[in-house]
Image (tube, grey):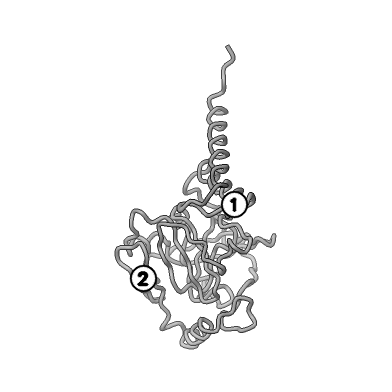
Amino acid sequence: MRRTNPVVLSRRKVLGGLASAGGMLLAGCSKDLPPTYGNVLRMGDVLTYRAQRVLLPVHRSVREYSHRDITSIPAIGTTDPADPHQETYNAEQGAIYERLRSGGFADWRLSIEGRVARPASYSLGDLQRFPARTQITKHTCEEGWSAIAEWTGVPLRNVLQAVGALPEARFVNFYAYDNNPDSIDMLDALHPQTILAYGMNGRALPVGHGAPLRVRVETQLGYKSVKFLRRIVIANEFDDMGKLGLIQNGWSWYAGI
C-alpha cells in the first residue's frame, strides 16, 4: 500500500480548505473579512490574507537591523496635511493640523474609542509615558523601493490593553489628518512590532513622515503604516472606510510581506 506523507496531506487539506473558502467569498461579503465586492481580484486578496494567517506564525517577527544599516528614507504620499496642493487635502482637517503644528503639537490628542471598556484621549506626553519600544526595520514601499530607519514609540498592544479592548474586537481603524484612513486586524494590532511611533532615527518624528504620530505595521507594505494619526476606532466588523478608503480605490486591504 502506498503511504501518503502526512505533512503533504496536511498542506493539501489546508490549501484545499482555503480555496473552498475563497470560492464561497465570491458569493457575498463577511463581516469578519474584507469584502470581495463580487470581484475575482478582490477574492484573491482575501484568499492571500487567509493563507498567510493559516500558514505563517501569528506573531512572526520581521528582521531588525543595526544602526549602521540605517539609510535615507524619502517622505512620500502626503507630506503636509495643511498643504492645499496635497492630493487628499481636507480644508477642515488641514486647518486643525496647521494650528496643532504651530503649537508644537501641545494640544494634539489621539482619541481611542469604539469596542473598548475605557475610551480615552492621549496627548503626546501621555503616550511617551508608556514603556517605549525602539526598532530598526525595513520600510518596503509598494512603489518598489525600500529603506531602513529607526522608529521609537509605544506598542499598540499596550495602548489597547490600557483602554480595555473588548473580546469581540476584530479590527483597528486609523483616521488621519491627511484624510487617508485605513485599518488592520487585531492580530497585526497585537503584534509586538506594531507601534505608535513618535520618534524616528533618534529624533521627534518629522512632519513629512507623519508627525506627531504614525503607526508602524512592520509586517505589511509601507502604505499600511498610516501617518498623521488623530483617531483610532476599535470595531468588531470590517469597515472599508467608504470612498476615502484604499480598498475601494483598487488597493489591497491586506499587504503582508
Do the residues under discs 2 and 1 have CB atoms within 8 angstroms? Answer: no
Q: Which mark is residue 38?
A: 1
Q: Where residue 192 sits in the image (x, y, percent)?
A: 44, 55
In the foreground, 153 or 232: 232
Amino acid type shown at disc 2:
Arg
Q: Is residue 18 above or below residue 177?
A: above
In the foreground, 152 or 67: 152
Identify residue for label 2.
129
Q: Where residue 185 sits in the image (x, y, percent)?
A: 47, 55
Closer to the camera: disc 2 or disc 1? 1
Task: Please name the residue shown 62% across and 52% down the image.
Answer: 39
Q: In this view, does 20 lie above or below 25?
A: above
Q: Is residue 219 left or right of residue 141?
A: left
Mark 1 crowdedness (10 Å alpha carbons): few <14, some 14-19, many ≥20: few
N-terminal of the pair, mark 2 or mark 1, is 1
In the foreground, 178 or 241: 241
Q: Is residue 239 left or right of residue 123?
A: right
Task: Point out the image quarter for the N terminus.
Answer: top right
Q: Where residue 216 sits in the image (x, y, percent)?
A: 51, 63
